[in-house]
Amino acid sequence: MTLFGNKHHSFNTVDESFKHFSLVLSSATKTFNIAGTKNSFAIIENKELRDTFKRQQLKNNQHEIPTIGLITTQVAYESGQEWLNQLKKVLEKNSQFVYDYLNAETNIKVMKPQGTYLLWLDFSAYGLDVSKVDKLLKEEAKVVLNNGITFGNEGKLFFRLNVATPYDTVKEACQRIAKTFNNLDIK
């Protein structure tokens, strides 16, 4: 799912030759919020690579997709476009608010997303360690964000804010974060 007019270019479409040695693994689960249906698919244009992939799936007993997964994927792709369009409007509105508000009102740098509903917030300007930022978010702002440390040490002062929620909830979370970090007495 992309936002703000951005386009996704699958690896195998970048260059015609890439189709000979690549495979694309995908799923409707994140875009359409159907992760519980446990389904995904592979696009493998090279027959030899596809046969190898199929053999490995059989060996790992991963060759069957639950019926519910097949049905939900089909329905999502065939009938879910209007729902997706409405979702993207909500995500874009919420993302734009977070970007504008926190960048203007705090020293938090918000990365504008190209896609997804998780925004990166950079708290490094405050000069605090990650545990202090996390504690302030949870105990003072009463907001729980995902710590970016799970993406490596470089992400330790980044936190992810989920904007796939009502606008008023996003607004309140941002106001709490701003109040907490604007009232810091850093010496």
Image: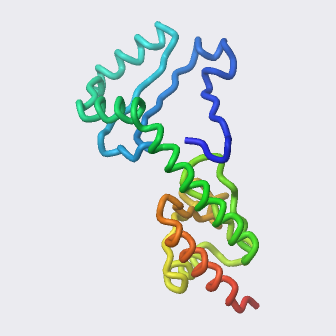
The percent position of residue 159, horizontal first and vertical second, equals 59, 65
The quarter of the picture where the C terminus appears is: bottom right
Location of residue 174 by image quarter: bottom right
Looking at the image, what colour scheme do you see? rainbow
Q: Residue at x 47, y 29 (%)?
A: 25
Q: Is residue 36 above or below residue 55?
A: below
Question: Which residue is outermost to the top?
Answer: 47
Q: Residue at x 50, y 84 (%)?
A: 139
Considering depth in this image, is 28 or 56 the residue closer to the camera? 28
Q: Residue at x 51, y 10 (%)?
A: 46
In this image, 177 relative to 105: left or right?
Answer: left
Location of residue 123 by image quarter: bottom right
Q: Is residue 60 above or below residue 147?
A: above
Q: Residue at x 60, y 59 (%)?
A: 93
- Number of disc labels: 0
Q: Is residue 1 above or below residue 143?
A: above
The percent position of residue 179, horizontal first and vertical second, equals 63, 85
The percent position of residue 102, horizontal first and vertical second, equals 69, 71
The percent position of residue 75, horizontal first and vertical second, equals 35, 33
In this image, 146 relative to 4: left or right?
Answer: left
Location of residue 80 by image quarter: top left
The quarter of the picture where the N terminus appears is: top right
